[in-house]
Amino acid sequence: MRALKVDFAPARRPVAALALWGALCAVATAGLGGVAWLAWDERTARVARTDVDAAEIARLKDVLRMRADRASADAVPPSYARDALTVARTAAFPMQPVLRSLETVAVDGVRVGGIELNAARGAAEVTLEFDDYKALLAYLEQLNEGASVQRWTLVRAEASGARRQAVIRSNWP
């Protein structure tokens, strides 16, 4: 067999293809960097707009609060407000417990002469006619019987001739 004598060609590097690939990567990197730069600028502008909007909202809330305060200070209560408050207090006054406590107590020699319910003060005043002081005190004790705090108190007792009168008061929440 005969020996073959072969000369191998030196390895060729594809310089043109590598240069083209490098240029393509540089252009893509520059393009992506530009897009990222624009997105960053847009995000920064959006954050700045949000801050400006929040400041404007806070300012408008302050203006509205000041206007509401000024309007409430200048507001005149309606002419019926006082009467409406009196009606509401009267409706909320516990008349039934007051009358029930007076009806359940009976002592010989003590009569109820008048009842005045004052819802504005939350009090009830009862005028009593009595024969003797012992009966009056027994009546008052029976009214307060079973209560931890004395609800009914003696305001005054007076005697003019044969006629004796007393006033008792009770405060109701």
Image: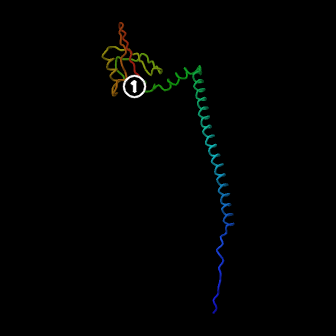
Question: Which of 87 and 53 lies nearest the eye of the viewer?
Answer: 53
The quarter of the picture where the N terminus appears is bottom right
Question: Which of 4 and 152 lies nearest the eye of the viewer?
Answer: 4
Residue furthest to the bottom? 1
Picture colour scheme = rainbow
Residue furthest to the top? 161
Image quarter for residue 115?
A: top left
The quarter of the picture where the C terminus appears is top left
The residue shown at (64%, 91%) is 2
User: Residue 89 appears at what percent x and percent y?
Assistant: 50, 24
The residue shown at (34%, 19%) is 108
Question: Which of 75 and 1 lies nearest the eye of the viewer?
Answer: 1
Image-based side of 24 in relation to 61, left or right: right
The residue shown at (65%, 60%) is 25
Image-based side of 20 in relation to 161, left or right: right
Task: Look at label 1 and name its amino acid.
Answer: Ser
Q: How many marks?
A: 1
The residue shown at (55%, 23%) is 84
Q: Is residue 155 above or below residue 20?
A: above
Neighbour tally class for label 1: few under 14, some 14-19, many 20 plus, Cα within 10 Å: few
User: Residue 125 appears at what percent x and percent y?
Assistant: 42, 18
Image quarter for residue 153?
A: top left
User: Residue 146 appears at what percent x and percent y?
Assistant: 33, 28
Q: Is residue 132 above or below residue 150?
A: above
| SS at circle 1 | helix
Question: Which of 121 and 44 lies nearest the eye of the viewer?
Answer: 44
The residue labelled by disc 1 is 101
